[in-house]
Amino acid sequence: MGWTEAVPLGAHAQVIAGQSPDGRFYNQDGNGLPFYQGKKDFGASELQPPTKWTTQVTKEALPGDILMSVRAPVGPVNFTREKVCIGRGLAAIRCRNSMDADFLFYQLLGMQDRIAGKEGAVFASINKAEIEALPIVAPPLPEQRRIVAILDEAFEAIATAKANTEKNLQNAREVFEQQHDAIFADLANSAEPIHLGELATFRNGVNFTKRSNGCSIRIIGVKDFQSHFWAPLDDLDVVTLDGDLSPNDAVSEGDILTVRSNGNPELIGRCMVVGGLREPVTHSGFTIRISVDRGRAVPPYVCQFLRSRVVRRKLIDGGNGLNIKSLNQGMLAEVAVPLPPRDTQEQCVARIEALTTATRDLADLADRKTAALDELKKSLLHQAFTGKLTGKATDRQLEAVA
């Protein structure tokens, strides 16, 4: 039989199903064995440091065992490097002498999608017998170790490439923020500031309940504050209001919307300019509408000023509320906006939009590169367990996406 033919996992490894101790034996003081329950405790390839221990030990996993998540999500794997107690959400897989643990780990990593479900159906759980029946390949140990060595080197290179890609993107975003801030810092020294309350009017968004029985309308909510100047209006939620929509609650082209509250302080003050309206649209009670005097100010200019880090930080730090910080109209009215002539405002917007486009292009490139690296990992795992993995071919594939 060729080594690429499948055999049951249970022929080369022991499977230990987890069992949760009684909760009264749990502690956070380090007494007993570290206790792990499921995937939430997984790291990149090894368990994260323990946060819970148990003095009643039910099922043990030993150093070097592979742990598999057996309840949704089903299939993710991690190593444990110490003796631990495992609960019902995990199973330990202990390799016999015929199986290299790293080889099996990589193989299970490549099988995750198939373990999780077939034909789109995701299993809620997998049991010991089903794990033992998983089809694996088991070449001679020297071949297993050759494959592991190639994958170790390739995956390290992929991790480095992904880290470099993310670092480059972070640097590009920081350069954007610095130049964005510099534009308004220069204006602050040359343009007369005016309080936003003298330049605009404000209105909180509408509230609605499931029992509402009035008109249905699309609504811009906090989830839609993702783009720089507009919400994807075709994807807006439709809600039913109490009664008819007041004309004062309809959003107009060029209105600025900002997040008032949403339970997350980092979202406070996030804003957008509304455009591309083709039908009546309103905005949620978690937002505030800012309607600026178009004769004096360009809405995208005001929006970009509110986006600057100095202003955002003031709004976030100044958020009030006992349990959920929130922004209010009074706080917005006190924001001092440097107001140069309209043509200067438009020039500032054009400069920031050019920076935005360049940064977005870099982000798209980073996403494509990360996706290519993830696909390469899947491809290498497939090659490894179908007898097609060679060091030279792997190097060429890495060079192609590096």
Image (cartoon, helix red, strand yellow):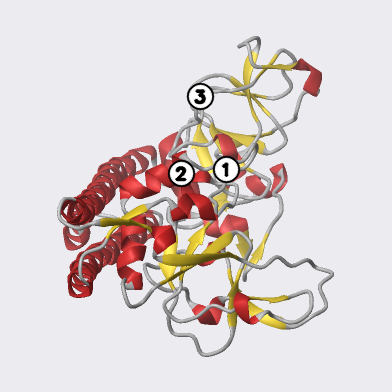
**Going 63% across and 82% down the picture, which residue do you hit?**
247
The reply, left or right, for residue 36 in relation to residue 43 is right
The reply, left or right, for residue 274 in relation to residue 128 is left
Badge 2: residue crowd in 10 Å (few <14, some 14–19, many ≥20):
some
Q: Name the amino acid type tagged 3.
A: Pro
Distance of label 2 from label 3 (alpha carbons): 33 Å
Q: Are marks 1 and 2 in contact (CB under 8 Å)?
A: yes
Circle 3 sits on which residue?
Answer: 49
Foreground mark, 1 or 3, reads 1
The reply, left or right, for residue 186 in relation to residue 330 is left
Q: Name the amino acid type tagged 2.
A: Ile
Mark 2 or mark 3, earlier in chain: 3
Q: Name the amino acid type tagged 1.
A: Lys
**Going 36% across and 71% down the picture, which residue do you hit?**
299
Which sits in the foreground, 144 or 91? 91
Circle 1 sits on which residue?
Answer: 325
